[in-house]
Image (cartoon, rainbow, N blue to C red):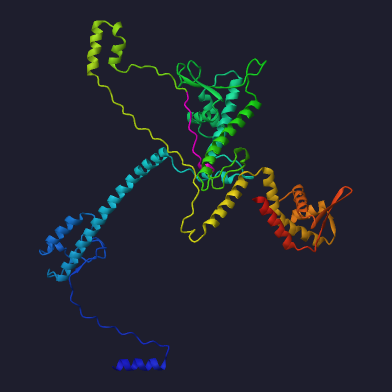
Amino acid sequence: MAQSRVTDYFVRRRPGLAAPRLKKKPAPPARRRLRLQDSDSCPGSPDAPSSPTASDSPDLAPLVKRLKKATGSAVPLPQPTVQQDKVPSKNSVSELKSCLQRARELGAKARALRARAQEDATKPCISEAKSSTEQLCGKKAPAYQRFHALAQPGPPGLVLPYKYQVLAEMFRSMDTIVGMLFNRSETVTFAKVKQGVQDMMRKRFEERNVGQIKTVYPASYRFRQECNIPTFKDNVKRSDYQLTIEPLLEQEAGDGIPQLTASQLLQRRYVFRHNLVERVKEHHKAFLASLNPPMIVPEDQLTRWHPRFNVDEVPDIEPAELPVPPTVEKLTTAQEVLARARNLMSPKMEKALSDLALRSVEPSSPQAPSLALPATPPATPPTASPSALKGVSQALLERIRAKEIQKQLAQMTRCPEQELRLQRLERLPELARVLRGVFVSERKPALTMEVVCSRMVGSCHTTLSLEEMEKHLLLLSELLPDWLSLHHIRNDTYLKLDKAADLAGITTQLARQTRAEGL
């Protein structure tokens, strides 16, 4: 007590001086209880207390045995720590039961993971089988083929589908190779043509493509199966039959040896493309007949396809039949040999062959059913749902449909000159505003054509040449002679603009003219 008073006195007199720490008496030892190691800690860890195992207790022995049998060697067994007097408590039994339940759950999870791993191992085989069936039945083409017609540059017209254009390019390459070999008086075989076409196009060229070419242009080649043709290859014998190709040419008077000239190649290419376009026109005609109401467009006036007609979904061309090599009868069984050479054998040999024929078994070779590729159906126009047109009068719908059909018919029968004029008309409202700005900035009543064209080319959003800009200005003066007038003085052409005119009315008049000619 006196020591604590002295310490308080020094602390009050000297605040910086800290009081010495007094040693606390150790707490009385508490009663130790039976504890189980945690399931996350292993028995051999250094943190685990050294205590006798649960197997020393006669009451816990059967539970430990069942736990070992359920979990095996994968899950470590919890080892309880017992008191020195080896008396288990009720808490140790409940904890052991919970550990056993957890071990069973871990075993169930391990079995589920093992089953899932087996399923994942079998999935690649199933996916490969599905991919092979999709290739046989025809899978969906990539986007650059399905929308090839929409990505073509230039004004829209009678664009061929992607597969038809590939076939046209194959015919061009094939005709080039055949012409080179034919002009050298060399026998043209399919093997030579196939290698040349694949080197030119970097695409596969098979007999199916040759059959498609024959379907489109039957009068292009003559196909035969011939043998005894030197090939200079180890895998092809001289006695084997090969498919030979001979171009069909019109024999001109006075010519000795026919030749496939460059002009004939161009003519044949033009005929092939024309035949492809005619095939697409047939599908387009069927599409127009399926519309509601149906449309009829003369084929000689058709310049573009219907907006709803999907060109790239036209069915593929069916290949024509090519000559096949003659079937040579081959003797495969002893009965066939005996039937063929019965008169050429002695009685002993005939008896030996008959015995061999009785012991031989003919192998069965069932043929797999052929898979036919489904033909792509023609495109059908989308129909409006009845609920969307609820409350609209039928007369109004008929007028709208008639006007839409008239507009589509005008688009399909428009010539290239009219298309070019319509494109220029669409640019005129913007050019009119730029032209007025040029005259206002120059502050002159009249300007030469060269000056106006050079100023407008640099100010217009659309990239146009000087010649094309001059054609637009001539069209603008033709449509609005009162607003923009032309004056030819000597060798120059001067433009004079009415700055007092209303620009909004001018642009409205030009837009009205564009709509009138676009129908």
The vertical placement of 101 against 23, above or below, is above
Image quarter hosting the N terminus: bottom left
Front-most of residues 138 and 298: 298
Question: Is residue 207 in the magenta section?
Answer: no
Q: Residue at x 29, y 47 (%)?
A: 118
Q: Residue at x 37, y 94 (%)?
A: 9
Front-most of residues 315 and 351: 315
Q: Quadrant of residue 326?
A: top left
Q: Position of residue 183 (x, y in %)?
A: 61, 20
Q: Residue at x 14, y 61 (%)?
A: 63
User: In the image, which residues are magenta?
Assistant: 311-322
Q: Quadrant of residue 201?
A: top right
The vertical placement of 481 against 32, above or below, is above
Q: Main secondary structure of the magenta part?
A: loop
Instruction: Report whether residue 194 is seen.
Output: yes
Tag count: 0
Instruction: Name the side, left or right, on which 374 lies relative to 93.
Output: right
Instruction: Report whether residue 462 is seen.
Output: no
Front-most of residues 110 and 244: 244
Instruction: Determine the residue located farthest toward the right in the rendered image.
Output: 490
Q: Position of residue 22 (x, y in %)?
A: 31, 85
Q: Residue at x 52, y 59 (%)?
A: 393
Front-most of residues 37 and 291: 291
Q: Position of residue 494 (x, y in %)?
A: 84, 53
Instruction: Determine the residue located farthest toward the front in the rendered image.
Output: 395
Instruction: Name the side, left or right, on which 128 lies relative to 194.
Output: left
Instruction: Determine the residue located farthest toward the left in the rendered image.
Output: 58
The vertical placement of 62 against 305, above or below, is below
Instruction: Name the side, left or right, on which 28 lies relative to 242.
Output: left
Q: Position of residue 153 (x, y in %)?
A: 62, 45
